[in-house]
Amino acid sequence: MNIVQNFKYRNVITKIMKPSKKACMIYSGGKNICIYPSEKTLNVIGKKYTLLIIALLGNEKYVKFNEILRNLGSPRANIISVRLKELESLGFVKNRILSNVRPISVEYALTKDGRKLRKLILPLLSWIEKKV
């Protein structure tokens, strides 16, 4: 493994390692696919509430923030806000601000890439449901 960088956090030196080429590769159908560049996306997808948000937004055209909270069982608003921002930064979610209503409201929807991601996740979720 190659050391990418060292940094000091709370007086502890941590080494961030880049995975070896073997750990990075998936061999399938004669193709080699490196999963390392997709690490950020996989990290966000694996976080709490992310799949639920993708499922909820995929079932509706646009969903208001408070409706998202209500449908997810009223988790802390800041957690959902962070997840939505992470999904927006990856290009899976878009928002629109409704300034013609008071108070100002924000609606969220899946982008084209978000809908593609949802379609890719569905078989995995079906497989998991059968295994559990």
Image (cartoon, rainbow, N blue to C red):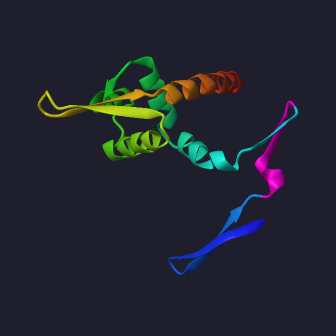
Give coordinates of residue 76: x percent, y percent: 34, 43
Count of numbered marks: 0
Is 117 on the left-hand or right-hand side of 81?
right
Q: Is residue 23 above or below residue 33?
A: below
Point out the image quarter for the C terminus.
Answer: top right
Is-magenta flag for residue 21? Answer: yes
Give coordinates of residue 1: x percent, y percent: 78, 65
Q: Is residue 7 above or below residue 96?
A: below
* 96 or 128, nearer to the observer: 96
Considering every residue shown, the one lying at the far right of the view is 30
Considering every residue shown, the one lying at the far left of the view is 102
Task: Name the residue located 35 percent from the left edge and 43 percent from the top edge.
Answer: 81
Q: Quadrant of residue 62?
A: top left
Is 46 on the left-hand or right-hand side of 28?
left
Is-magenta flag for residue 108? Answer: no
Task: Name the residue located 75 percent from the left edge and 58 percent from the top edge.
Answer: 19
Give coordinates of residue 49: x percent, y percent: 47, 37
Task: Name the residue located 50 percent from the left edge and 41 percent from the top edge.
Answer: 90
Q: Quadrant of residue 98?
A: top left
Give coordinates of residue 39: x percent, y percent: 63, 48
Considering every residue shown, the one lying at the far bottom of the view is 11
Q: Quadrant of residue 63?
A: top left
The range drawn in magenta is 20-29
Task: Name the residue located 43 percent from the left edge and 33 percent from the top edge.
Answer: 93
